[in-house]
Image (cartoon, helix red, strand yellow):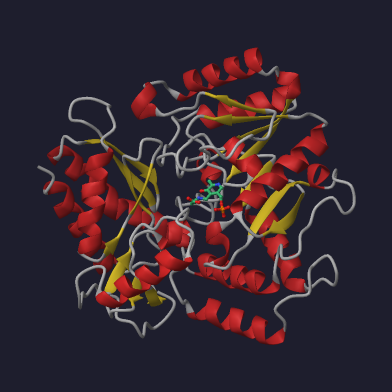
Amino acid sequence: MTSAHAIEQRRSLMTQIPGPRSKELHDRRTHAVSSGLTVGLPVYIERAEGAILVDVDGNHLIDLGAGIAVTSVGHAVDEVVAAVSDQVARFAHTCFMVTPYDAYVEVCETLNRLTPGDHDKRSALFNSGAEAVENAVKIARRATGRQAVVVVEHAYHGRTNLTMALTAKNMPYKDRFGPFAPEVYRVPTSYPFRDGLDGPAAAARAIAAIETSVGAANVAALLIEPIQGEGGFVVPADGFLPALSAWCTDSGALLVADEIQTGFCRTGSWFACDHESVVPDLVATAKGIAAGLPLAGVTGRTELMDAVHEGGLGGTYGGNPVACAAALAAIGVMERDDLSAKARAIESFVRPRLEALQRACPRIGDVRGRGAMLAIEFVVPGTTTPDPAAVKAVVASCHAEGVVVITCGTYGNVVRLLPSLTIAEPLLDDGLSVLESAVRALD
Ligand code: PLZ
């Protein structure tokens, strides 16, 4: 831990979950906020520190979601709080395209240094993951002079018009929001639990689909999450990503890695591509980069990033100075405290417990993930038929006990764990015990 915690890192419940004050706020929300936004657990948060969320009723909940892989350094870390406070007091905004500032440049230098590959790189900063993906596609099209973007099954890349087209799952992301952007092609991926293929075979299947339905010479970018996030924490079989990477090199298509959920130490290395020494042409980052402030980046080979005409990239807030200050502080903590090692230690602690749970519970079809990005997929025992009802029951019990867990998966049948990488072991142990009891209580 980097901070001496004022909030005790221990779960404690003062009321039922949600408590009366949260219920009041939720009632207000219903009258003020569009019902198009749903909520996982309607407790309203008053403050947070480390891996504890404190709600308006005084309940201390264990956060095993980190705001969907964002607060990887923990909540309210001293270094981030100080950097953000200092920056906001100096200036909160100028627009980097109008009058620049050094923190933006330093974040780009840092991204160029940390992303896979030691080639010459440039970066550009944006606000959200979806915006980073959109810009990666713009850059890939401009740099290659080609239009087609290839994505895979179960992919998630965002909710804007282009990124909805890139995202695989209809409900809730796309339904009746079309028409969607053209020149997007979807091919099979590697999902070992469901397809039983090894990496090279899954890659050969994807490549055959691209070559027959798109044509290699038309492909600007093959865009892929090295480990799928929203799609179900799907880790491709070994050799899948390297084979796709080699195909991209041969065919002049760019390999664009969406490391938005997997990046910044989450999987036990700076980026998930590092595990198989895959070097993408462009990398999209967001989430964990800035400890909760909105920031995203695209980093890539200089000749690609500089192929865009002057003024072709930008936005009012992209690379906002406060978000950049947060990123520099958060990345500083990751480097100083080797949070990749912490993510690997989390895997060593959690995975055996999940595997033991799988042996005891026939509804768990698969335990998978890497580092502090781990998941369990629920199925009807003895089949691969998804069981989203089991997930609902498990999540409801965890929530009632004050443990915030979130779900994912094309079939809504995956519980995912994304704790902050600095979570204290007793807290992780307690959170896991609650999860284990919830799973054992199924029938
Ligand atoms: N690419 C790999 O995981 C965001 C989405 C939550 P934004 N994932 C959480 C929801 O239901 O909207 C994500 C991601 C990957 C892109 C994105 C998009 O990032 O910052 O949400 O735009």
Picture quarter containing residue 23? bottom left
Q: Vertically, is 126 above or below 423?
A: above
User: In the image, is 227 to the left or to the right of 393?
Assistant: right
Please state, as top left, top right, bottom left or bottom right, where the N terminus lies in the image: bottom left
Q: Vertically, is 146 above or below 68?
A: above
User: In the image, is 188 to the left or to the right of 359?
Assistant: right
Q: Residue furthest right?
A: 310
Q: Position of residue 77 (x, y in %)?
A: 47, 76
Nearest to the observer: residue 141 or residue 289: 141
- Please tell me which residue is depicted at 23% across the width and 25% down the height of the picture: 383
Figure label count: 0
Please state, as top left, top right, bottom left or bottom right, where the C terminus lies in the image: top left
Q: Residue furthest front?
A: 31
Q: Position of residue 422 (x, y in %)?
A: 40, 67
Q: Position of residue 3 (x, y in %)?
A: 42, 80
Q: Position of residue 338 (x, y in %)?
A: 48, 63
Nearest to the observer: residue 198 or residue 90: 90
Q: Vertically, is 56 above or below 171?
A: below
From this viewpoint, is residue 347 visible?
yes
Picture quarter containing residue 27? bottom left
- Please tell me which residue is depicted at 57% across the width and 68% down the height of the picture: 293
- Please tell me which residue is depicted at 42% across the width and 37% down the height of the picture: 234
From this viewpoint, is residue 51 visible?
no
User: In the image, is 316 to the left or to the right of 340?
Assistant: right
Q: Vertically, is 332 above or below 225?
A: below
